[in-house]
Image (tube, grey):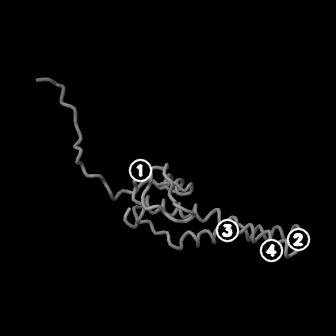
Amino acid sequence: MSDHSAPQTRSVAEPQDDTADRPLRPALARGYRRQCPNCGAGPLLRGYLTLRRTCTVCGEDLSHARADDGPAYVTILIVGHLMAPFLHIVFVRFRPEPIVLATIFCIGCVGLSLYLLPRIKGMMVGFQWARRMHGF
């Protein structure tokens, strides 16, 4: 008898563990970059905020993601917490005219909100994908 045993082969039909969480950090980073949380190569959004039904690169089904109003609430929370102290500092230190202050901070708030909103939506979709929520 030989001490050499036949190599172990894995069955192709072994079931995958579909309940384990996927890596969260890469999914959030890919979502922030507005890329597919699975492959990181395909675009996540079809327009400014319209989510693609499937990834154009890996074919991951993204139709189950439901961000709803979450990204808007988080965006308002972040923009408010960033701009309010900055508004106070600028007002106390420089004392600009009220109309100048209002104009600058309105433009800043709108610009920051427009920048953050699709990225936060991507992060929420990435979080849902990583935690297998809503059908992922």
Residue highlighted by disc 1? 58
Calculate the distance from the C-alpha at mark 3 to the C-alpha at mark 2: 21 Å
Q: Earlier in the sequence, mark 3 or mark 1?
A: 1
Q: Nearer the viewer, residue 121 or 53?
A: 53
Q: Earlier in the sequence, mark 2 or mark 4?
A: 2
Q: Earlier in the sequence, mark 4 or mark 3?
A: 3
Query: Within 10 Å of the Cα at label 3, are there few (<14), some (14-19), or many (20+) other Cα atoms?
Result: some
Query: Within 10 Å of the Cα at label 2, are there few (<14), some (14-19), or many (20+) other Cα atoms?
Result: few
Image mark for residue 79:
3
Disc 2 marks a residue whose amino acid type is: Pro
Quadrant where the image shows the N terminus = top left
Residue highlighted by disc 4? 102
Q: Residue at x 40, y 66 (%)?
A: 64
Image quarter of residue 109 = bottom right
Q: Nearer the viewer, residue 99 or 88?
A: 99
Q: Nearer the viewer, residue 132 or 66?
A: 66
Query: Within 10 Å of the Cα at label 4, are there few (<14), some (14-19), or many (20+) other Cα atoms?
Result: few
Q: Earlier in the sequence, mark 1 or mark 4?
A: 1
Q: Earlier in the sequence, mark 1 or mark 2?
A: 1
Calculate the distance from the C-alpha at mark 4 to the C-alpha at mark 3: 15 Å
Evaluate if marks 3 and 2 touch, with contact meaning CB atoms under 8 Å apart. no
Calculate the distance from the C-alpha at mark 1 to the C-alpha at mark 4: 46 Å
Residue highlighted by disc 2? 96
Number of marks drawn: 4
| 133 lies left or right of 115 | left
| 103 lies left or right of 44 | right
Position of residue 87 relative to residue 46, above or below, is below
Calculate the distance from the C-alpha at mark 1 to the C-alpha at mark 2: 52 Å
Q: Residue furthest bottom?
A: 98
